[in-house]
Image (tube, coloured by chain):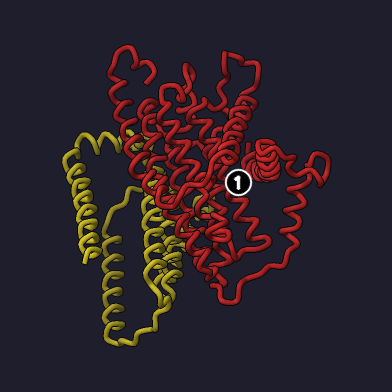
Chain colours: A yellow, B red
Amino acid sequence: MEITGEFIAFFILSILAICGAVFMIFFTNVVHMGVSMAFTFLSIAGIYFLLNADFLAVIQIMVYTGAISILMLFGIMMTRHKETEEKLNRPIHYGLSIAGAGVLLVSLVLLSRGATFVSDAVDTKGYGIEKIGELFFGTYMIPFELASILLLVALIGSIIIAKKEGQE
Amino acid sequence: MDLFFYLGPIILMLLLLGFVTYAILFERKVIGWIQNRPGPNQVGPWGLFQTIADVAKLLLKEDIVPGKADRALFKLAPIIAFVPAFAILAVIPFTESWQFGDFAVGLLYYIAISSITIIGILTGAWASNNKYSLLGGMRSAAQMISYEIPLVLSVVGIVMTTGSLDLNDIVLAQKKVWFIVPQFLAFLIFLIASLAELNRTPFDLPEAESELVAGYHVEYTGFRFAFFMLAEYVYVFAMASLTTCLFLGGWLPLFGLTMIPGILWFLLKFSLVVFSLFWIRATMPRLRVDQLMQFAWKVLLPLSLLNIFLTAIFKEIPVLSSFY
């Protein structure tokens, strides 16, 4: 296998993403978990960049790293007083989750062996933001607008619930 | 070309350090001049070595990590805050040929990457284990998130006019008239929101000395404190460059004076923006914390939506549509 800059970048980014996810599970401090999760989100955005999906990568950073991680950290810092969690000792849970993860791994391996991948280099030039815009506001106009209305309803609903709790 | 690929960022870093050194001196001189006092004038002729002396002091200081701080995050936070500040410079087109990465989504890249700095500020504030720094970090995060929305929406008008998110295309679209003329409302919103993003007066609540001691970096000393300050001034550099590219026509000459090279035009406009940032700092009082959020959500956000609406209408009017 030829070692290119792309390969090295992919290697580093995937290690960062996996480490972030693993640390997220094994850290006991909630803020540490938040930061390692942000690293995972960022490395995944980097992998999107490598795949020439610039728009997706930028939106990934904007929404997940920029907004969601910060909101989570913010929420944790505002509300949690006890920062570290004790390690829970639940052998049945551990067993079940390891079995579940094993099944997921096996099925992923089987699926990816059976699937056919496009091995030739695909020209990604035509899939820029113009194309995305045309699809969103042309073909998928109604689902797109419905999704935005759903988000708006959720936003207003959460405000109303928060207001009710404040009045009591 | 290959040599430039490796050396370019290093040259840019050195230029940036030079800029930050003299921007701080310039800021203090300008504020001194506005407030009728000489400003720094003791170290070197005209105070030219003042910042160098300050930085040397910071680097020689004892490196203190507070006993009850979260050591790992405390050390990591300045890096998280600084790295994105430098990374966003990759998409700024300084001249036609002098740009590090030509993205089709350059503008979005800038906005997305710059929001990572907030994580650095928040973790630094929390890791210091100090209530003032935590309050400062919270204020900073809340402010930067709220003002990011009008900042992004104010440039949507420009994106609609150009039909591209590529900063090169945006600059080239200003050949006839700079966007500051047809998009004046957007320019005002952008300027105010960028001041808030930079945490500068009148929006420097995260660092309000009289309320919070010093804000999120209250426990930081020496080299790490210098890193936070460096990140702040690199953002001044980046934001001034972005304003130049978006509203003032980037490297394009004025009055067809093409014999002056593009980089000089860029520098002139850039310096003008930097000067006005310092000017605003010297003349404005600080906002109250309750006015701050109301202003972002109730004034700037509706205005930027109005701007998008107006741009869409003007695009359809025959006489005006040549400008939009």
Q: Is residue B168 left or right of residue B36?
A: left
Q: Position of residue B283 (x, y in %)?
A: 57, 38
Name the residue located 38 percent from the left edge and 72 percent from the top edge.
Answer: A80
Q: Nearer the viewer, residue B131 or A132?
A: B131
Report if residue B100 is visible in the image: no
Q: Which residue is denoted by mark 1 in the rendering?
A: B233
Quadrant containing the C terminus of chain B is top left
**Corner quadrant of residue B302:** top left
Neighbour tally class for label 1: few under 14, some 14-19, many 20 plus, Cα within 10 Å = many
Q: Position of residue B4 (x, y in %)?
A: 65, 39
Name the residue located 47 percent from the left edge and 54 percent from the top edge.
Answer: B140
Report if residue B107 is visible in the image: yes
Name the residue located 26 percent from the left edge and 34 percent from the top edge.
Answer: A134
Q: Position of residue B209 (x, y in %)?
A: 57, 56
Q: Nearer the viewer, residue B127 or B302?
A: B302
Protein chain holding label 1 = B
Is residue B278 placed above or below A155 in the rendered structure?
above
Q: Is residue A53 left or right of residue B280?
A: left
Q: Nearer the viewer, residue B169 or A81?
A: A81
- Dot 1 falls on a residue whose secondary structure is helix
Is residue B174 placed above or below A167 in the rendered structure?
above
Question: Amino acid under label 1?
Answer: Tyr
